[in-house]
Amino acid sequence: MNRSLQMNNIDARYTLSFTAEKDGQLLREALSEWRISKRALTAIKFEGGLLTVNSVERNVRHPLQIGDRVEVKFPLEEKSEGLVVEYGELTIVYEDEAILVLDKPAHQSTIPSREHPTKSIANNVCGYFAQQGLASTVHIVTRLDRDTSGLLCVAKHAHIHHLTGLAQRGGEVSREYEAIVHGHVIEDCQSIVAPIGRKDTSIIEREVREDGQFAHTDVSVKRRFYRQEEPMTHICLKLHTGRTHQIRVHMAHLGHPLVGDELYGGTRKLIDRQALHCVSLSMKHPLTSEVLHFTSPLNEDMQQLITNS
């Protein structure tokens, strides 16, 4: 499949171009093979998008010939409700026409909430998109808790978000974290496979429970140490699923809550947030299939916990 991406300066609609490779194939079938979702096709039809073959508008029943140039113009997107356009600082690790990879500091929400309606990553990305003249809302691909730092990915368009969602469900998006936990973790390497669900007595807290969603975390020990005579362990974690608070819940279930994670049994005597950082993000580019790999060093607060032991 020959595919190209363009952003037309005159027409601000997000546009993808494809070259047909099968004689007689209906446009609808080709679009499915090119992973254009039914939801996107509905939006194109009713919300101001456009399908053209060799620059002529066509519907999805149009038969294609080899070499036909197909253009898919997606409708302009509007900012999601609840998002506020703000112009705060963003640490950009990577950017192209499709995705934005950021290094998030601790103490900043990924998306706005009732408790923290402003200064979120999403609000700042809205402002950044506005500065670029990009007619899109914010699509978070990999979300981090407010007090977790490190790498996260944002899709610049709903279709790109759809593609990254398919990749995540296929295990093609890999995230690795480092954390500092209370106590000395005995096993050097282990897998935690334990379902996670919402705790009955809380709208925020999660717990391991039989009726929860499947969750799988791999844990390996980097270093066991003492800080002020208290045993701690510096660990690496790889997520195979992406449940809310997954690492925090699994480590607390193991008897080793994250240092600083008061919600799940940690203490903030030495750090004012859970000691958790996304150090690595790997994924195939949603359009080119190029393998992308990004890394982020630990924040200074976690480094100090380790080096001052």
Image (cartoon, helix red, strand yellow):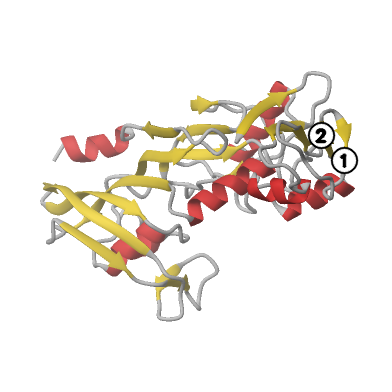
Residue at the far front in the pictured view: 23
Task: For residue 277, say whether it is visible.
Answer: yes
Name the quadrant containing residue 306. top left
Image coords of residue 192 (percent x, y): 28, 65
Task: Identify the residue under disc 1.
Answer: 58
User: In the rendered structure, which disc, 2 or 1, sits on the residue that comes first in sequence?
Assistant: 2
Is 17 above or below relative to 38? above
Q: Which mark is residue 53?
A: 2
Is 200 above or below relative to 36? below
Mark 2: secondary structure: strand
In this view of the protein, which residue sits in the foreground, 176 or 111? 176
Quarter of the figure with the C terminus = top left
Q: CA distance from mark 2 to mark 1?
A: 6 Å
Hey, what amino acid is under mark 2? Val
Image coords of residue 153 (percent x, y): 51, 39
Image coords of residue 295 (percent x, y): 35, 33
**Mark 1 surroundings: few (<14), some (14-19) or many (≥20) residues within 10 A:** some
Is 278 above or below relative to 170? above
